[in-house]
Amino acid sequence: MTATGAPIRVVVAKVGLDGHDRGAKVVARALRDAGMEVVYTGLHNSPEQVVATALAEDADAIGLSILSGAHMTLFPRVLKLLDENDARDIVVFGGGIIPDEDAAQLREAGVAQIFGPGASTQAIAEWVRGHVPSPDQGSPAAV
């Protein structure tokens, strides 16, 4: 929760044909347990569906889980759609099986953070709390 009580709103999504969602569900639960409002979109979403959900839910962040290897296509597409909707204030972060070199390129393209295998749910929740602007203050939430 933020200093004034408004929770950070996060859309957690699985994009593309990736059918493995245990990690996304674990992260969604951890963020919820940390006091955030979480919308989990389920499997097989298109980038268009994810961005539409984030806009409809007035999300502060989108967390993408990608294990399929299509991260260099799917993350940039989400960023482009956010640009087209004048919504780049929505922070995009993600995780999955993403090589370090690709993760660096994705961060350069505008993905705020990439979490690899073994990242703790506590570290992810702390990062979101520290890097996602508060919905009521427009700055990162208090830790």
Image: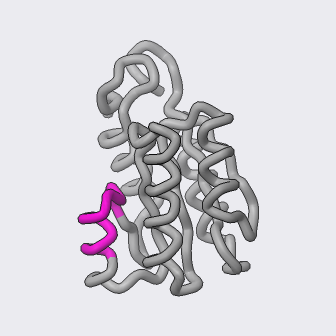
Q: Image check: 73 left or right of 132?
A: right
For residue 98, above or below residue 111: below
Q: Colour scheme of this structure image?
A: one colour
Query: On the image, which quarter does residue 124 sit in?
Result: bottom left
Residue 24: image x %, image y %? Answer: 61, 64
Q: Residue at x 31, y 40 (%)?
A: 130
> Picture coordinates of residue 36 (x, y %)?
55, 36
Q: Say above or below: 69 vs 105.
A: below
Q: Is residue 126 left or right of residue 57?
A: left
Q: Residue at x 60, y 69 (%)?
A: 23
Q: Residue 109: say if magenta.
A: yes
Residue 47 lies in the magenta-colored region: no
Pick the residue in front: 143 or 112. Answer: 112
Work out whether 106 lies above or below 143.
Answer: below
Residue 63 rendering spot, x and y as whole percentages: 51, 56
> Looking at the image, which residue sits at the far top?
4
Q: Main secondary structure of the magenta part?
A: helix
Q: Is residue 77 above or below residue 12?
A: below
- Magenta span: 103-113
Q: Quadrant of residue 109?
A: bottom left
Q: Residue at x 36, y 32 (%)?
A: 133
- Residue 143 in percent (x, y) is at 32, 34
- Give the residue displayed 25% in from the left and 73% down from the top: 104
In terms of depth relative to the viewer, which is nearer, 84 or 111?
84
